[in-house]
Image (cartoon, helix red, strand yellow):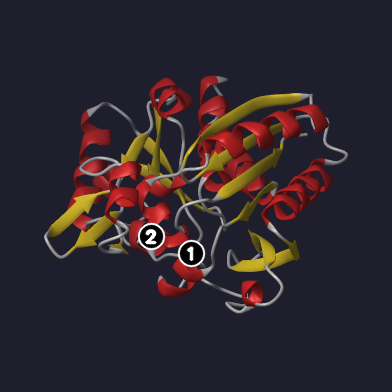
Amino acid sequence: MTAQKTAILVDSCSDVPEELRRRYGMYVVPMTIIYPDGEYRDGVDIRTDDVYARFPQEVPTTSLPSPSVVADVFKQIKADGYERVIVVAISSGLSGTYEMLRSFGPAPEGLETCYVDTKNIGIGSGFSAIRAGELIEQGLPFAEVCREVESAARSTKLFFCVATLSYLVKGGRIGLVSGLVGSVFDLKPVISCNEDGVYYTVAKTRGRKKSLQLALQKAAEFAAGAKEYNVAVMHGAAKPEADDVLAALKAQLPDFHLAIEGQITPVLVVHTGPGLIGIGIQRLA
């Protein structure tokens, strides 16, 4: 049995760009967005811009991927000829997705399965899935790929800034970040996930511009000493700012292996609102 018979399954909140999903043949289980008029599959039936367009009228709720959809994905992986699968999920400290995926057991549909709780969110989780794709492409044995992806997850950090904390508060995803941070003197936090995969305040400063500069500083500090690394800037309806931040990030960290920019998935939009800028760093060596 060869590593080439290994599939990769991610949830939609891992924010892996479409071109990389196609390159590595990733299977995606979509989260669910719930409006009064019905339920929508994240990134399938609804797009990021749709959520923004409806914000003035209503803010939806979200839920885990449908178990029936996950079961169908495992069946499809098996039908497509794979013998094993690496499941890469967003933080169990932020979502029940990881535990729900694990509930299908160590061998759903007879597939040898490795589950990775990235303790991260967005591209911070997606970087681990991308790493899995690279290692599988290199022909590494399944057990080694699993170990390396677990290690990659612990070497990845996402630093993000939001225009307002109100969406994190409303969605119950505020974690260890004080919901009152921004109420005095326009203090803006730089947020990340701690070792338990829960949001916490890395640092805070006054104003949007300074918060983005501080996030860049923290990202560069995390990358310091690494000989090889990936970088990313993801945004929520803030492309001009994202372009500027990515240019600054590349200038500070020019020896990147992979650089990614894109818009976050609809479910993440629900929980962060417009104006998110996230800077992802994955230390590879």
Which residue in the structure is indicated by mark 2?
97
| Residue picked out by circle 1 | 92
Point out the image quarter for the C terminus.
top right
Q: Position of residue 243 (x, y in %)?
A: 61, 31
| In the image, farthest residue toward the right | 225
* Marks 1 and 2 close (CB-CB < 8 Å): yes
**Label 2 CA crowd tier, 10 Å (few <14, some 14–19, many 20+):** many
Q: Does 220 appear above or below 165?
A: above
Neighbours of disc 1 within 10 Å: few (<14), some (14-19), many (20+) = some
From the image, which quarter does the N terminus lie in?
top left
Q: Nearer the viewer, residue 39 or 127?
A: 39
Please give the name of the residue rendered at 46% of the width and 36% of the height, measured from the top-left corner. 16
Structural distance between the alpha carbons of marks 1 and 2: 7 Å
238 or 146, which is in the foreground?
A: 238
Residue 50 position, x and y percent, is 28, 45
Left or right: residue 175 compared with residue 79: right
Query: Given the image, on which type of amino acid does mark 1 rest?
Result: Ser
Q: Percent position (x, y) of residue 272?
A: 47, 59
Please, which residue is most extreme toward the left here? 37
| Three-letter code, disc 2 | Thr
The picture quadrant where one finds residue 144 is top right
Disc 2 on helix, strand or loop?
helix
**Snapshot quadrant of residue 188:** bottom right
Visible residue check, residue 269: yes
- Seen at 70% across and 49% down, the residue is 212
Secondary structure at numbered mark 1: loop
x, y percent for residue 53: 30, 49
The residue shown at (69%, 41%) is 281
Q: Earlier in the sequence, mark 1 or mark 2?
A: 1
From this viewpoint, is residue 144 visible? no
Judged left or right of residue 90, residue 65 is left
